[in-house]
Amino acid sequence: MVPDQQAAIDFYCGLFGWQGEIGPAETGGYSVCTLKGKPVAGIMRAMNPDGTVPDPLPPTVWTTYLSTDSIDSTVKSVTHAHGTVMVGPTDVMELGRMAVISDPGGAVVGLWEPRTFDGAGIVNEHGALIWNELTTGDLAAAAAFYSAILPVTTARSEMPGAEDYIEFKVDDRAVAGMMDVRNLPPGVPPHWQPYFHADDVDELQAAAVRAGGSVLAPAFDMAAGRMAVLADPQGGAFSVITASMPDSPG
């Protein structure tokens, strides 16, 4: 969600090789960006439900969406588990139903009940989603919350050098991660963040800077591969990684 939708489309299409354009009026101009003809991400203009420009403008952010078989049931569980429903269940034409919630720690995340649209059509390839990560101030509380609202379990990572990292699992398959916000600079709030796979993190970092983006954490080696944390010209943060195991789940 960004103030200048076209500028964001231009930035990410140039960086990742996506294709995208501002959508029709009946969808609020929502842009579904594609790679190799398959959907990889969405970009929309920041606006109120009535189409007016918010004042003040919300921060530019990427929103992670978690899939659910029943959005109504999940949203009820959110309230019982002491989360907050920010946008209640809403039909998105015939595509599916969505909601936006925040967990007890304050991290915002979307929910999606698919109908004709399942979500990302490509993962784990250059320019496509490879991982989603929650940063929170209370790992135990977050683990309890998400396990209460969705069929996920949590476990400490078995990857050497990442013993303090927590993985979310579905049917014993890691699908997302969680880390302590105290590992980041002071003032960073709890949040979800997407990781996009890059064939060459250093090259992509340089390309982002040339396109007006900024570097929040320069390319570095870590347990799962080589990664960097970047921001687009409007301030939206995202991570890129050359994964040591590129078949990791998206």
Image: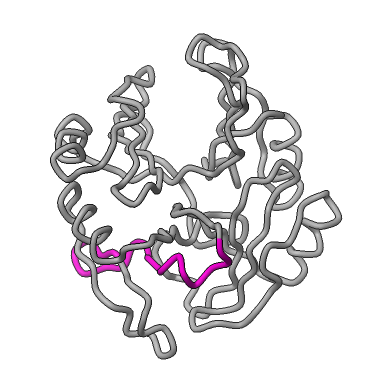
Viewer-proximal residue among 165 and 71 = 165
Task: Report the side of 52 relative to 144 (left or right).
Answer: right
Q: Which residue is located at x 35 percent, y 30 percent? A: 86
| 148 shown above or below 45 | below
Horizontally, residue 4 falls left or right of residue 246, namely right
Q: Quadrant of residue 116?
A: top left
Q: Position of residue 92 (x, y in %)?
A: 38, 21
Could you tell me which quadrant the N terminus lies in?
top right
* Residue ranking furthest to the right: 210
Of all residues shown, which one is farthest toward the front? 186
In the rendered image, residue 95, in percent from the top left (x then y), is placed at 37, 25
Q: Is residue 122 above or below residue 185?
A: above
Q: Position of residue 215 (x, y in %)?
A: 73, 62
Q: Is residue 173 magenta?
A: yes
* Residue 223 on the magenta span: no
- Residue pictured at 64% horizontal, 68% vertical: 228
Residue plotted at (55% across, 82% down): 222
Of residues 173 and 190, the one nearer the viewer is: 190
Residue sitting nearer the eye, 49 or 107? 107
Q: Magenta region: which residues?
A: 168-186
Residue 58, percent from left and from top: 58, 32
Residue at coordinates 37% horizontally, 65% vertically from top-left? 178
